[in-house]
Amino acid sequence: EPIPEEEPSPAPESPPQPEEKEAPSPIKLAKQQDTVAICGETDEDDEESGGEGAIRKWDEFVIKIDDIKELKIAMQAGSEPPPIWRVQKASLQQFVPEVRDGQRHFSSSSQYIEYPDEVKTDYQRLYVKFLENMEKKDYVRICSKKPWHRPLHLAKKQDSVAISGETDEDDEESGGEGVFRERDEFVVKIDDIKALKLAMQAGREPPPIWRVQKALLQKFTPEIRDGQRQFCATSKYLGYFGHAKNEYQRLYVKFLENVNKKDYVRVCSKKPWHRPQQSLRRQSQTKTTPNRVPVVVKPEPPARPASKPKQRPAKAKAEPPPKKRKKWLKEVASSSESDSTPNQQSEEERIPTGRILNTRAMKEMYKSYIELLVSAALDPAMIETIEANNDELYLPTMRKIDGILTDHKKRVTKRVSLSSSLQEGLQAFPQLVVEDSEADRKENPASSVKLKVAGAPYNRKTLNQLKKNVPRPQDFQVEAEKLQFYTLFHSLHHYKYHTLLHCKEQTDTLSEVNEDLGQEEIVQQCMRNVAWLEKLFDSFSELLTQVQQQCA
């Protein structure tokens, strides 16, 4: 038998070789950055940071206070830093670090967290520079210095203003002002000259100027165009004859252009060069002297006697002679003494309200007050800045309105006594809640009601929220009869802060509608909203009138 062939034995298995692990990718390092611009650490540095640009309100970023040290170390070493957050009202949007072209940038992500008032003290603001938007992502970088912050709605400063009578003696030609044109005759109110000079020197909004058009004055309102202070023609006119001419002073302007049927001019810093024609030089010199004399002298004699008969009948109608008034009072008193006394008192009570509030000067002052608060809503350092610079435009207005509110608050405290704890609570917290029903108050006026104070405390001087720990709000039991005095006291004390919140709502609405609006344009649009301004003024007047009636 054939011998079966042996099957070859299988080859020994080779031991399994270890799998090759991929080498970890090297950590990308960014360009090192020695400093980080964090609010509170670089605010005292007045130097402009080259290339950082200006702060934009919608680029407000914060970082956790616990991450500040780690952020500085990472930026100095070029390693990966912790994320930063963009403030969007009541939420925070996360920005994660990336390395782009060797630079450390941060890109927006889809992660959001809540940002209530209770956790705001855990974050600190830092300054960033917006770079670009690519594929629906915003890219920013952290600034090394605080960006250059130009104060709100400021134009380029102008040291001097060419006003007739003050610069006529200057024979030097003003470079670049051009030749004076007779048809560009402008005037300014004598009472506004000081304010005009201060505003042009500080770059702030000056009072309006007027173009002479025979017996009318056309109003020109201030605007900022390309950083320059200019004045734009409006459709408002005033009469310009008689004694009205003595209330204005001529100033020199330079015509710029006509856009959309509106003339734009600027105020000259010096009297423009005026050269009479050589052929008429002698004639102009001889004719101007006799022509000016009758223009100045002749109108004055008829104007003086004409003003007297106008004033006499006005006084006679408003206030009758004392003898007739006494006789009339006796007749009324004899018929009904009880009816005459309340009528006279009610008329006297109305006089302070009308004199204080229903005046043009008061409305203009209140408008300037609102303009300041609109600016403070856009720039939290606005009020502190005008006080530090002793601003002569906004500071007197703010102190005047604050003084009126303080005086009315004193009238309330004379009518009701406040305990120290209740007064501190009403002054510390901007919100007040009353827990009771009007039906119970009517049935039992002597009953007590509960007052609950709430809201985030703020700095009374700057109107910015406090970061330090404050005591928790308390509840107070007060008499229902005196409730109106407590609410009036609270409304007067926090009126400035509540009005600032109204202004902030207005500015936020405009920013959401058009994100490209600058701060100056937002301020101008708010001040052009006549209905909104009148609503604020009416609420202000109503508050003061209510105090006068309740505390009479």
Image (tube, rainbow, N blue to C red):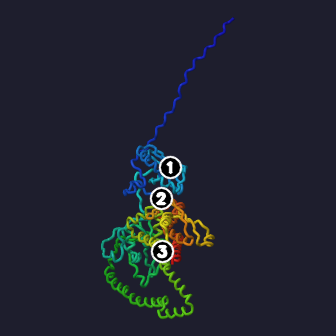
Task: Describe residue 519's horizontal placement relative to residue 339 as left or right.
Answer: left
First-in-chain label (1 vs 3):
1
Residue on which disc 1 sits: 95
Left or right: 33, with 9 as reference point: left
Q: Alpha-carbon distance for marks 2 and 1? A: 31 Å
* Badge 3 amino acid: Lys
* Quarter in which the N terminus is drawn: top right
Q: Position of residue 80 (x, y in %)?
A: 46, 44
Q: Which mark is residue 414?
A: 3
Q: Give the SS element for disc 2.
A: loop
Q: Position of residue 374 (x, y in %)?
A: 48, 66
Along the line of sight, the residue nearer the viewer: 384 or 158: 384
Q: Hey, which residue is sitting farthest right in the picture?
A: 1
Residue 389 falls in image quadrant: bottom left
Q: Which mark is residue 470?
A: 2
In the foreground, 31 or 413: 413
Asked if the residue at tag 3 contacts the one at tag 2, i.e. Cβ–Cβ closer than 8 Å, the answer is: no
**What whole-number distance in Å separates the C-alpha atoms at marks 1 and 3?**
55 Å
Disc nearer the start of the sequence (2/3): 3
In-front residue for pair 340/271 = 340
